[in-house]
Amino acid sequence: MSLLPIKLDTTEEQMLKALVKSHSLTKVGVLRQALRLLYTIDERQKQGQRLFFEDKDSKERIEFLFL
């Protein structure tokens, strides 16, 4: 296992703290899950799959693009 120090700006730190609190995880846990999620999205997009967010009421769909 490697140690990776990172610098977050104030907004990123606030987002991280909010996710830690709302999901009862550690900061490392949130970052690991985020990395796994982005990797999965990237791999699936390479296979031609697409990811959408859909409004439950209006059924409007918005595609998530990971650049």
Image (cartoon, grey):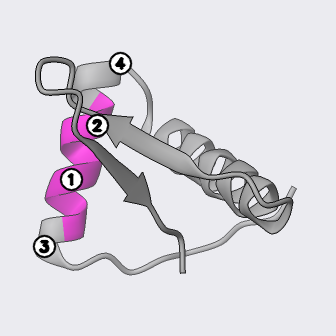
Give the residue type at disc 1: Met
Image quarter where the C terminus lies is: bottom right
x then y, percent, for residue 64: 43, 58
Tell me the mark number nearer the camera, choosing from 2 and 3.
2
Circles 4 and 1: CB atoms closer than 8 Å: no
Chief secondary structure of the magenta span?
helix
x then y, percent, for residue 26: 44, 33
Residue behind mark 2: 19
Q: Crowdedness of circle 4 by 10 Å Cα count: few (<14), some, many (20+)?
A: few
Q: Disc 4 to disc 2, how far (Cα)? A: 8 Å
Residue that appears at 77% across and 53% down = 44
Query: Is residue 18 one of those drawn in magenta?
Result: yes
Q: Nearer the viewer, residue 18 or 67?
A: 67
Q: Disc 3 to disc 4, how far (Cα)? A: 21 Å
First in residue order: circle 4 vs circle 1: 1
Part of the protein shown in magenta = 12-20
Residue behind mark 3: 10
